[in-house]
Amino acid sequence: MTRSLSDQTVLVTGAGRGLGAAIARAFAREGARVAINYRASEGAAQALAQDIGPRAAAFQADVTDAAQVMDMVAAITERFGAPDVLIHNALAGFSFNGEARAHLDRLTWADMAHQGETAVGGLLACLRALRPHFMAQGYGRVISIGTNLVQNPVVPYHDYTAAKAALLGLTRTAAKELGPMGVTVNMVSGGLLRTTDASAATPDAVFDLVAAQTPLGRVTTPDDLADAVLFFASPWARAVTGQNLIVDGGLVFG
């Protein structure tokens, strides 16, 4: 079974701002119904939904709370129909600032768990809430958002990178289990994005250095990555699952 983007209801977690907002706009541009999840960014999420129009709405839920996720999915289903596509973009509070990052001598397991709770636990909660719908219709598309730091940890953000590596693992095991239901599960991994709230603390010199080392000669934008996410939800990716597509202008090969 394949479906055009305009026929789908899409849930984007952490979509009130930054990359999530760019992903929401990309799907809206293609005619999809878009559920904008937010945890605390209510004003930004509501403004985004209003800007997109009647085929978008904002829904509050902390994705680390399974009960809140279930309630959110019920509210989305009542408004637009059950989500056909899940984009798991939600990120625990994080700043890409190499000078201020936690080094191993002061990093704690609580730091690691905090990142993993949103990255991995959030995807698990969403999958559990959506699985009955996926099974009933024999169709679903799941795209998680990763990082090229797993392949090339040029800056050792230990907690963030470990959480995204674990998310990649869950993405692939979920692809194995959900495949027989007609559900594909893939990851899109970005590099440093110019600019999101998380990368706002990154010095301009670092952006310039990344651009100089990238074959395309520029830093990837949220819109660049959002368009790649569309591919995995489209009919053209119907035979692709368990994959990790790195979208960073060619900075990392493989």
Image (cartoon, rainbow, N blue to C red):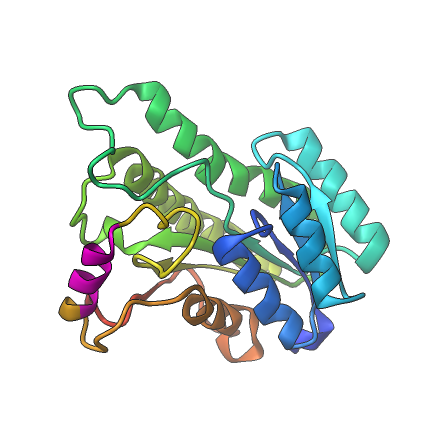
Residue at image position (52%, 71%) is 230
Q: Is residue 131 visible?
A: no
Residue at image position (48%, 49%) is 174
Q: Is 143 located above or below residue 115 in the figure?
A: below
Q: How many marks?
A: 0
Residue at image position (70%, 66%) is 52
Q: Position of residue 42 (x, y in %)?
A: 67, 43
Range drawn in magenta:
203-211
Q: Position of residue 173 (x, y in %)?
A: 42, 48
In the image, farthest residue toward the front: 204
Q: Is residue 127 visible?
A: yes
* Image quadrant in which you'd find residue 201: top left
Q: Is residue 54 left or right of residue 139?
A: right
Could you tell me which quadrant the N terminus lies in?
Answer: bottom right
Overall secondary structure of the magenta section: helix
Q: Nearer the viewer, residue 186 or 206?
A: 206
Could you tell me which quadrant the C terminus lies in?
Answer: bottom left
Residue 208 counted in the magenta span: yes
In the image, farthest residue toward the right: 78
Residue 59 counted in the magenta span: no
Q: Position of residue 78 (x, y in %)?
A: 85, 51
Q: Is 113 located above or below residue 130 in the figure?
A: above
Q: Nearer the viewer, residue 248 or 176?
A: 248
Q: Is residue 171 left or right of residue 25?
A: left
Q: Is residue 67 left or right of residue 162?
A: right
Residue at image position (29%, 42%) is 161
Q: Position of residue 209 (x, y in %)?
A: 15, 62
